[in-house]
Image: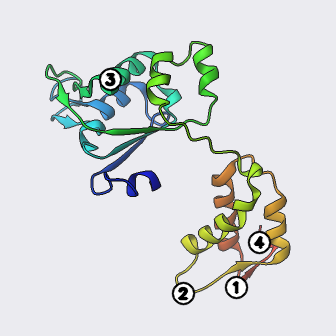
Amino acid sequence: RAIHFNSPRAKKPLVDINCGALPDQLIESELFGHQRGAFTGANETKKGLFEAAHGGTLFLDEVQALKPDLQAKLLRALQERVVRRVGGRENIEVDVRVIAATNQDIAEAVKKGEFREDLYYRLNVVGIYLPDLRARREDIPLLVEHFLNRHGSPGVPRHFSNEALRLLMGYDWPGNVRELQNAVEYALAIGAGPILTIADL
C-alpha cells in the first residue's frame, strides 16, 4: 500500500488477491476474468483483477501457491501486457504494476522445480526482504502503538504497562506481525482499564 499510494499510480486502483486462498479453478477467472457461458455458473461476462487494476497496482499475495499452468499464464500477461478472459478469444491490453509477496523461500522453490524460473526472474525485478519480527524488535513498540490506535475505542487512549511492553518485546513472535496484532486486539478486548497489563495478554 505504501508503494502504491506514494507512486504516480496512486489515483488508480490498488487491487489485491491472496493466491493461496482460492481454489485453483477460481483463480484464473479472478485474475483474467471470464466470458459469459465459459463454465457452469458464468452467467455474465466478468472483468478480471488485471483489468480492474488497469493503470494501478495488482498485489499478488502468496504467489508461490499458483499452479504451474497459472504460472505460465501469469508470465504471459506480464511479458506481453495482455490478458485473455477464460472462454474469450480477444487479447485485452493491460497496464498494471505487479507486486508479489511470499512467505516461502521462493528461490528454493525454483530450485525444486515448484516455481517457474522465468516467472521468478520476471517478478523479482526489485526484491524487498522483510525480516521476521524477532529480528527487528525495535519495530514492536511502534507496531503496538499503531494497533492500539487502530483497534481501540476512539477517544479512549489505552497503553500497555512497562512490564507488559517488555514481555511483548521479549517474545519471539513466530506468527510475526499478524500474531502481534492478534495479541494487541486480545488485550484490548480482555483488559478493563486504560493500562493493559501482563494479565491482559
User: On the rendered image, what quadrant is the C terminus found in?
Assistant: bottom right
Say if 118 sits above or below 100 in the image: above
Q: Which residue is mark 3?
A: 79
Q: Earlier in the sequence, mark 2 or mark 3?
A: 3
Cα–Cα span, label 3 and label 1: 54 Å
Q: Are marks 2 and 3 in contact (CB under 8 Å)?
A: no
Residue 114 disc label: none
Say if 192 sits above or below 95 in the image: below
Cα–Cα span, label 4 and label 1: 12 Å
Cα–Cα span, label 2 and label 3: 50 Å
Amino acid type of the residue that numbered disc 2 sits on in the rendered structure? Gly
Cα–Cα span, label 2 and label 4: 21 Å
- Give x and y (percent) for residue 77: 30, 25
- Give x and y (percent) for residue 32: 28, 30
- Give x and y (percent) for residue 137: 76, 57
Amino acid type of the residue that numbered disc 1 sits on in the rendered structure? Pro
Q: Earlier in the sequence, mark 1 or mark 2?
A: 2
Amino acid type of the residue that numbered disc 3 sits on in the rendered structure? Gln
Left or right for 133, reference 78: right
Residue 194 disc label: 1
The residue at 32%/34% (across/down) is 30
Q: Which residue is mark 4?
A: 200
Cα–Cα span, label 3 and label 4: 51 Å
The residue at 21%/31% (across/down) is 42
Amino acid type of the residue that numbered disc 4 sits on in the rendered structure? Asp
Q: Earlier in the sequence, mark 3 or mark 1?
A: 3
User: On the rendered image, what quadrant is the N terminus found in?
Assistant: bottom left
User: Pointer 2: residues within 10 angstroms few (<14), some, or many (20+)?
Assistant: few
Left or right for 94, reference 140: left
Q: Are marks 1 and 2 in contact (CB under 8 Å)?
A: no
